[in-house]
Image (cartoon, rainbow, N blue to C red):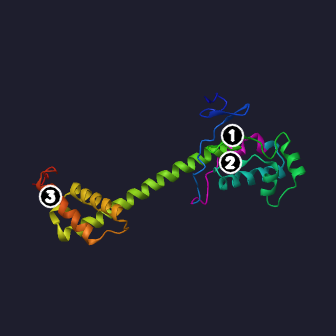
Amino acid sequence: MRQATSSNPGAVFRLVGNTELPEYPVSSSVRLDSHGFIAWEFRRYLNSDMRWNATHEVKGMWFDLAQMSHEQTPVGTLPDDHARLARMLVPFVDLMTFEALVERPYGVLHGWHPCVCDDGTVRLMHNTVTRVVLEALTRKELNAARTDSASARKRLDRLAVALAGVAPSIAMEPAQVYWVDAHIRDAMDREGNKRRTEAQLHGAIQACLEKVAAGFFRKSQRE
């Protein structure tokens, strides 16, 4: 295994048979099912040799396959099988016609090249499509992090309101509210319930008060 050259920066290569192929950077287990759209580097495409030199027929098929790659496993790849690719097109293309279009200088698979996936299969990847996929995955992770953060904030706010009625001294201390929340979530994980129970809330409050009495928390600046 070796790092890529400057012609394919960032890639890692693996020997498959007698051929050294780049490793596809996205796992087969990763999906983008929740994404109904993708960002597209349209300026790169508008100025590409493919757009300027390929026929309308070829460009239509090329773009169709690029879109379908986002539904494949791993996401962003295509099967290294001309017969299967010809059948994936709508309307489908007979194999002889498809292979003739592939052989053109700017053919249906222009820019696509073999790679090896994490499960050992050899498929086709396109550097631009791969970059789009990686950026989409990054946005997915950021959105998930923001959603998790917002959900946690709302949960803590609801907990503070609940604590204000039964343990106001805890409700006024953010560190203690966080501690109670963690105690409840641990209890929920152990007991397998998705919503906190009154017993879990009161158990966490009692445990927190014992920690307070033992000097576990710093004294509030308000005291």
Badge number at residue 156:
none
SS assignment at label 3: helix
Q: Nearer the viewer, residue 50 or 43?
A: 50
Q: Which residue type carries mark 3?
A: Glu
Q: Which residue type carries mark 1?
A: Cys
SS assignment at label 1: strand
Q: How many marks?
A: 3
Residue 188: x and y in percent read 33, 64
Q: Residues within 10 Å of mark 3 (few under 14, many from 20)?
A: few
Residue 36: x and y in percent read 61, 60
Mark pair 3, 1: CA separation? 59 Å
Comes first in the chain, label 3 or label 1: 1
Residue 100: x and y in percent read 88, 46
Q: Residue furthest left?
A: 223
Q: Is residue 215 left or right of residue 52?
A: left
Magenta highlight range: 34-51
Q: Which residue is mark 1?
A: 115
Badge number at residue 77:
2
Give the position of the C terminus as an image quadrant. Answer: bottom left
SS assignment at label 2: loop
Residue occupying the point 68% across, 43% down = 44
